[in-house]
Each structure stands twice: as structure tokens, then as C-alpha cells.
Image (cartoon, rainbow, N blue to C red):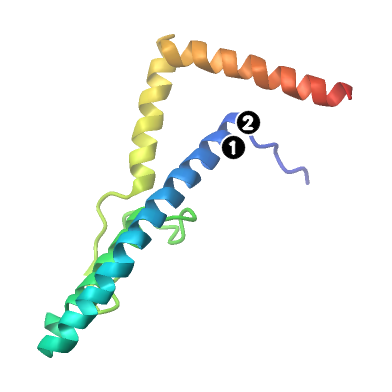
Amino acid sequence: MHEPDISRWILIRDMLIFQVKLAIDAGRDLLLSPVSIICGLIDILKGHSISKSYFHKLMAFGQKSDTWLNLFGNHNHNKGEESLNIMSRKPAKVDVNVDQLFSQVESLLKEQHGKGGLTASAKATIDRYLNKIVANKDSE
């Protein structure tokens, strides 16, 4: 059985989306690291219970943001279904995730491309340059 080739544009799209997701994830990690220490210290000093714990609330937020970001694709295979919140054991519904936002942007760009707008000429130019690169590589 022959596996179909991946489209150049699908691969470029997937790489760009992954890089944006990595940047968002890195920014979130940089923010959550010091905030988690501060929340933990406040909980220790005030003697908070788990239900009032700032640290555990931050962990629940981190889990929701993980689900929203969906860094490595569709882990759940059931988009829009409920995911389990570890701390409260209650279902946590995620209405919109970053993949859906990218999908909306992609739809808008495809619509503009169909109308022959700026994206159509940009795509044609990029295609021309990529074809030249591939042709030069094949001729070597």
C-alpha cells in the first residue's frame, strides 16, 4: 500500500502552527514558574486547605491551558468532549482551543485566496521560489 505524499502547504501550515504553539507554551511556562512558587509560599504561610489553595487553583488553570493549547495535536480524538479536572474530579469543558482558532484563520485565508486577493499572489510567488529550490536541488 502506498502512503500519500504530504502537501507542501499542509506541512508548512503544520510547522508554523506548531512553532506558535511552542512559543505560547514557553511563555506560559515562564509565567507559571514564578507564580507557582509565590502561590505555594502563600499557601504554606496561610495554611490554606486544598479547596482554598492558590497553588492547586493554578494547577487546575495549567491543566485547562494545556487542553486549550493542545500542543501535539488532537490527543483526545474527540474534540469538544469533556476532559477530567484532576483536582476537583469534575468534568472541565473546553469550548474553544487554539486549533479551532487556527482553523478559523486558515478559513479566512482560503476565502481571501479564492477571491484572488493578496494571499493568492503571495502563494503563487512562494510556490515559484520553492519550485526553483526543489529544481536546483534535483539538478545537483
Image location (x, y in percent) of residue 49: 13, 88
> Which residue is labeled 2 in the image?
8
- Where disc 2 sits, the SS reads helix
Callout 2 amino acid: Arg
- Image position of 97 (left or right of 116): left
Q: CA distance from mark 2 to mark 1?
A: 5 Å
Tell me if residue 85 comes above or below residue 132 in the rendering: below
The residue at the point 65 percent across, 14 percent down is 128
Give the numbered dot on residue 51. Answer: none
Crowd band around label 1 with a 10 angstrom C-alpha radius: few (<14), some (14–19), many (20+): few
The residue at the point 30 percent across, 65 percent down is 32
Tell me if residue 12 comes above or below residue 65 in the rendering: above
Callout 1 amino acid: Leu
- Where disc 1 sits, the SS reads helix
Image location (x, y in percent) of residue 62: 30, 66
Q: How many marks on residues?
A: 2
> Which residue is labeled 1 in the image?
11
The residue at the point 81 percent across, 26 percent down is 137
Placement of the C terminus among the 4 image quadrants: top right
Residue 8, located in which quarter of the rendered image? top right
The residue at the point 78 percent across, 46 percent down is 1
- Image position of 81 (left or right of 39): right
Image location (x, y in percent) of residue 88: 21, 79
Image location (x, y in percent) of residue 31: 30, 60
Q: Are marks 2 and 1 in contact (CB under 8 Å)?
A: yes
